[in-house]
Amino acid sequence: MIVTAEINLQTKGHCDIIDITAQVAKHVGKVGIANGTVTVFVTGSTAGVTTIEFEPGLLADFKAMWERLAPQDIPYDHNQRWQDGNGFSHVRASFLGASLVVPFTDKKLALGTWQQIVLVDFDNRHRSRQIIVQVMGE
């Protein structure tokens, strides 16, 4: 069986990190599938999905790492072409990736104690984000 749902969020951009674990777990718990996998996919090219320990120190470290990896203040050909100033956000999102697959057993996500599912919005402005949650299993 495959069941698909959506999570819709408003984000602030600028490496806004939002814990979506509870929403994903809610979808897994209500679909009538005991064991399987859930795919979490964000539509758009300036955001990504991953797991992280959702605590203030690590969130600050994570944001600082992105600035070192793909700084906002260097030239991007994308910015020259489109004049939207978010070339860095496309590069960051491509590194992180748009999807994540998490197994579950007895309707419980197989996440570690300090592991949460997060959406990271890299864009240079606030956005409405759509996250597709697709549960597959038996």
Image: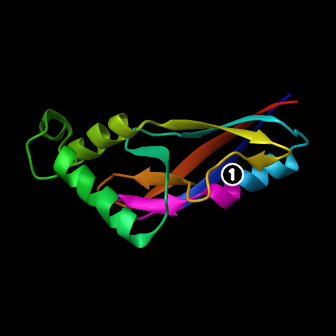
Instruction: Name the one closer to the observer, 9 or 92.
Output: 92
Using the image, determine if residue 80 lies above or below residue 7.
above
- Report which residue position mark 1 lands on: 24
| Residue 36, image x, y percentages | 78, 33
What's the residue type where badge 1 is placed? Val
Residue placed at 13% from the left, 33% from the top? Answer: 77
Q: Quadrant of the C terminus?
A: top right
Quadrant hosting residue 101: top right
Left of 58 or right of it: where is 136?
right
Farthest-out residue, right: 32
Q: Which residues are magenta?
A: 10-23
Q: Nearer the viewer, residue 89 or 100?
A: 100
Q: Residue at x 44, y 44 (%)?
A: 48
Residue 70 appears anywhere in the view: no
Residue for point 33% across, 57% down: 62
Q: Quadrant of residue 41?
A: top right
Q: Residue at x 77, y 56 (%)?
A: 26
- In the displayed structure, does residue 38 sit left or right of residue 74? right
Q: Position of residue 75 (x, y in %)?
A: 8, 42
